Image (cartoon, rainbow, N blue to C red):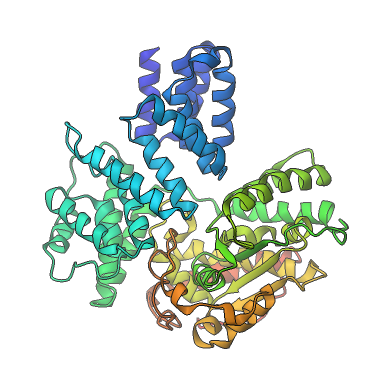
Amino acid sequence: MKNEISNILNLIKNGHNSEAVREAKKLHIKNPTNIDVIKILAYSFIQIGNFEKVIEILKYGYEEISNNKDYDFFNNMGYAYSQLENYEKSINFLQSAIEIYPSNIESYVTLADVYQKLKHYDKAEELINKTLSKAMNDPHGFSIEKNINLLLLKYENCSSLEKEHEAINLFHQLLKKNFNADLFYLLTRIKNNGLDNSDLINLAESKLSLKDGFSSLIQQTNFESSICYGLGNFYQKKDEPKSEKYFIDANTKIYNISRYNSHSYQSNILSIIDNYNKYFTNYDEASYLDGSENFFIMGSPRSGTTLLESVVTSNKFVFSGGEKILGKRLMEKFNASSEKDLNDFRVSFLSQYVKETNFIKHDYKYIVDKMPENFLYIGMYQKILPASKIIRVLRRPWDIATSLFKERYIFSVPYSTSFFNIGIFLANFEAINTFWNDNIKIKKNILDVRYEELVQNPKTIDSIYSFLGIDPKEYDPGAREKFFSNTASMGQVKGDIHQNSIKKDVFKSKKNEFYDAFFAQRQYWQQKGILQLENDFFGYKFDH
């Protein structure tokens, strides 16, 4: 059995997570009550992000030995609940794990992350510093690679508390002792990072020639692409052609090992449209007031959703919930379910989503969910939470495309690594949003905001606040300048609102690739009867 478990761990180490799950399932069938097998099965499901299954496996697996629940049980339950955004349960499990094994830092990191998301910055800071101290005093030595999530959390917390210099100084100290590609990339994302005329840039460039010492192609690709993304960031304002070359190299490396299938995204949209027509069109929501405390900000990634969140939450009434995965996950499960009961779904959605957002927002009156891809389910949200307010952000498509291409998403936004796939994605974005425009009858709770108007016209903020039912005088520009996001936009929305990201004519050699894909996918949606081929993208003229 040790050999089988070792094999599963090696599969996970080399990035073969789906295969690891299959092998863990086989082992569990043979040994259904063995606690080590139960643990490896749960751990394999953590790798593929199926946290509901992790909880199910652990609950059932430990049922017969409920009095002997160990550190692994509480730690993994706490982590799973944190990823499902059930923070109250997560905190309880993690605290139990810490009581059992106070010297293990994993639970501290997850708990600090939960407090950071809940905006309990002082609690998070105390835990982060305590955990960093434990890690750095490890008798086996401090490993940047093993503690990269802790270091990222350190930066997020420092930025929240206006202490960025602490993280910058720490990162420089660590990189001088031992170069790490992920930490180097993170440092390039921080303003005033101290990298000008730095030996670190030369060191990073020299590391790209390394070909040995990697355990897998995935490890080598992540190492090289992180450096290239970082160098692309560094040279953006110094040498644009050089910067573009590094971004292209980074994305090419990731693209070559990724398996993104745009057809599955397309099929998902067709399924959403079909389910909406079958179950939601005639659903009478008029008597419901659910969602009166919920605001949604939606749009393509890199369209300006984070900037808008910083505006909407810069007052004493609205809590910044960030990119909540819970609502989107519940919508996805309903869409994929073979047996659908809309009334049961509504009750379940309210008991989970509204309960959790109410817990998160503390004493604030409202909470914002800024998950961009909620745009897929606008019609569903409006029916289930009819009193909620939805703001959809629109932006010039080429600006979205170039901004996506420069972000190191790795696998979280898989289409971002090629302009061809970005073009297909934006045509899909146009199709589903056109469907909502044509099929949602009552639009009083939906507002479209253009990124360009947001950064150019201060009166746009007044209209946004009026739409949300908040006095525009409550807007606090000072609070907005201090706003922090732990998304790809981290640090980019701090300071004054600027117009530097409008009509940036970069990556010219890739423009035809983008538009050819966009227009080809557009024709597909025209054939499906979803789109009429207009000469604009929600009012934006094409510049191909």
Question: Number of marks in the image?
Answer: 0
At x 36%, y 35%, the residue is 106
Q: Is residue 19 visible?
A: no
At x 51%, y 64%, the residue is 301
Please state the horizontal and vertical placement of residue 249, each as a whole percent of the image: 30, 61
User: Residue 208's image quarter?
Assistant: bottom left
User: Residue 499's image quarter?
Assistant: bottom left
Residue farthest to the front, as pictured: 363
For residue 494, above or below residue 8: below
Q: Foreground: 498 or 24?
A: 498
Please state the horizontal and vertical placement of residue 37, each as a whole percent of the image: 46, 17
The image quadrant where one finds the N terminus is top left
Q: Is residue 341 visible?
A: yes
At x 77%, y 72%, the residue is 443
Please state the horizontal and vertical placement of residue 506, each as a whole percent of the image: 38, 77
Does 415 sit left or right of 432 as displayed?
A: left
Does 311 sit left or right of 158 as displayed?
A: right
Does 439 sit left or right of 143 as displayed?
A: right
User: Residue 285's image quarter?
Assistant: bottom right
Please state the horizontal and vertical placement of residue 534, each as a whole percent of the image: 67, 80
Q: Foreground: 249 or 227?
A: 227
